[in-house]
Image (cartoon, helix red, strand yellow):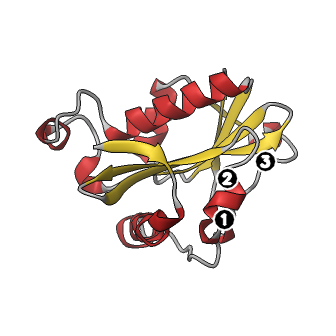
Amino acid sequence: MNFRPYQTTDKASTLNLILSIQQDEFRVAITAEDQPDLHNISDFYQSGTGNFWVATHDEKVIGTIALLDIGHQQVALRKMFVAKAFRGSGHNQKSVGQNKGVAQSLLDQCHQWAADQGVTDIYLGTIDIYRAAMRFYEKNGYRQINKSALPIKFPLIAVDNVFYHRPM
């Protein structure tokens, strides 16, 4: 298992992972065209206090997470997706020698990056059908907030209907 910043060679694998989870697994009505950030990840995410990471196993992208710089030392956590076979802390993690899950490792990397960059607040939007993700965020110190409490520059995605905040 490897965790590293996104590289342009990861584009196809990253897009396939995200779309398969959104469309096939959760039946979310969203396309690649609805997510222009996925077409130029480096320029969109990897600037300022933002970044985009991938988790790989056998050279294949199995997880993603991003922080988008929205100004005022605040970031939006976006594109957190982990392939189904690598979720949780079950036997799949142990079989590849991990002490903690892929999602936790990706989130820990984001939190460390944010702290190192002097970020004061992390915000995120998600969909209420991602119940396990919501529990995961809450376990990691995120608190649900009203949409009206989001910063002005928070990038809204049409399908998101639950929002969270975590001070750093």
Q: Could you tell me which quadrant the C terminus lies in?
A: top right
Task: Give the residue type that dot 2 points to.
Answer: Tyr
**Residue 142 appears in the figure:** no
Badge 1 crowding class, 10 Å Cα cut-off, few under 14, some 14 to 19, many 20 or more, is some
Q: Where does residue 68 sit, x and y in percent of width and height?
A: 70, 47
Task: Give the residue type that dot 1 points to.
Answer: Asp
Does 98 appear above or below 27? above
**Residue 137 appears in the figure:** yes
* Residue identified by numbered label 2: 45
Task: Give the residue type that dot 3 points to.
Answer: Phe
Disc 2 from disc 3: Cα separation: 14 Å
* Residue identified by numbered label 1: 37
Q: Could you tell me which quadrant the N terminus lies in?
A: top left
N-terminal of the pair, mark 1 or mark 2, is 1
Local SS, label 3: loop
- Mark linked to residue 154: 3
Q: Residue at x 39, y 33 (%)?
A: 105
Disc 1 from disc 2: Cα separation: 8 Å
Q: Residue at x 70, y 27 (%)?
A: 117
Q: Nearer the viewer, residue 131 or 140?
A: 140
The answer to whether residue 168 is left or right of residue 79 is right
Q: Nearer the viewer, residue 45 or 31?
A: 45
Q: Residue at x 17, y 34 (%)?
A: 97
Does 124 appear above or below 116? below
Contact, mark 1 vs mark 2 (Cβ under 8 Å) = yes
Closest to the camera, between mark 1 and mark 2, is 2
Q: Please identify the quarter of the rendering in which residue 122 is found.
A: top right
How many marks are shown on the rendered structure?
A: 3
Disc 1 from disc 3: Cα separation: 14 Å
Closest to the camera, between mark 1 and mark 3, is 1
